[in-house]
Image (cartoon, rainbow, N blue to C red):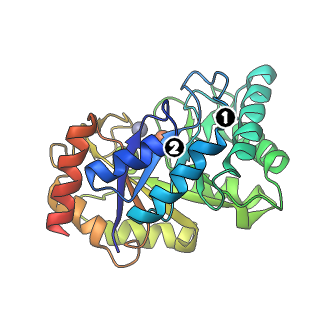
Amino acid sequence: MLKIGCHLSASKGFFKMAKECEEIGANTFQFFTRNPRGGKAKDIDIEDIKKYNEKAKQIGIEVIVAHAPYTLNLAAKDEGIRNFAKEVLEDDLKRMEYVPGNLYNFHPGSHVGQGEEIGINYIIGILNEVLKKNQTTTVLLETMAGKGSEIGRNFEEIKRIMDGVKLKEKIGVCLDTCHVNDAGYDVKNNIDKVLDNFDEIIGLSNLKAIHLNDSMNEIGSHKDRHQKIGEGTIGIDSIMKIVKNDRIKELPFILETPNELEGYKKEIELIKKLY
Ligand code: FE
Ligand code: FE
Ligand code: ZN
């Protein structure tokens, strides 16, 4: 069963997001755990979660993806910035236990000129502090486009982080189709080769979610500008080959395209029609 959904606003709570899924034909979704600047998260509303659980069951939501504020930087040079990132992760992972057994995605970070070696070590250090044996959430490293000093610009860097993490069963990867295109992987012409490469370096069993985005830019541009499905350089045929690929077709596919709800609804309809 195809799991398809999109990024939704969490400002009105979980039940509202499930209702929106119902409206647009989605059976999974992604949301920011707090505003992108990383401010204080809203208090968890138990009543809201109860109503959400019922609705989620009714419309067949099996898994959802939380996204950390993208401004967090676990690899920062400044200790205060790294500590802030750690505190946000810790708090978010506690809150995730109110919706147990789901995925929590974050951008590995930017080494801001220190070099990726130092950056990767900072990321590993924080992950080893915040991951807990008894948590039910799987934390995902997102594959990045490699703009600026972003870490996670190739599968090797993601693997180096994973190698340093002690609780390996708590960590996985989210592959963003726009990001890997921009990073230089040929998802347009040869998704199978990209997945072979992922399998060889990281292991496909560690792949837990797909961010399904077209790209405004050419392969290898290191830009990270998402485009609507079928309107970018990847194109609808290649997008459908990705969604239908046997090795990943059980994963949740999350659209992060430049759309409002109505646009997402159309993209989901199109993908389901072609599936
Ligand atoms: Fe992201
Ligand atoms: Fe993404
Ligand atoms: Zn992006």
Q: Vertical placement of 259 versus 54: above or below?
A: above
Tag nearer the camera, 1 or 2:
2
Q: Residue at x 18, y 56 (%)?
A: 269
- Residue 37 image offset from top left, x and y in percent: 57, 21
Residue position marked by numbered label 1 in the rendering:
115
Task: Answer few, some or many: residues within 10 Å of disc 1's Cα (few below 14, many 20 plus, some between 14 and 19).
Answer: few
* Disc nearer the start of the sequence (1/2): 2
State left or right for residue 201 relative to residue 212. right
**Label 2 C-beta lies within 8 Å of the nearest ligand 1 atom:** no
* Image coords of residue 83 (percent x, y): 80, 28
Residue drawn at (57%, 32%) of the image: 69
Amino acid type at mark 2: Phe
Say what amino acid the circle numbered 1 marks: Gly
Check disc 2 and report its element: helix, strand or loop.
helix
Q: How far apart in space, not on screen, are marks 1 and 2 (Cα)?
A: 39 Å
Q: Which residue is mark 2?
A: 14
Residue 227 in view: no
- Give the quadrant of the C terminus: bottom left
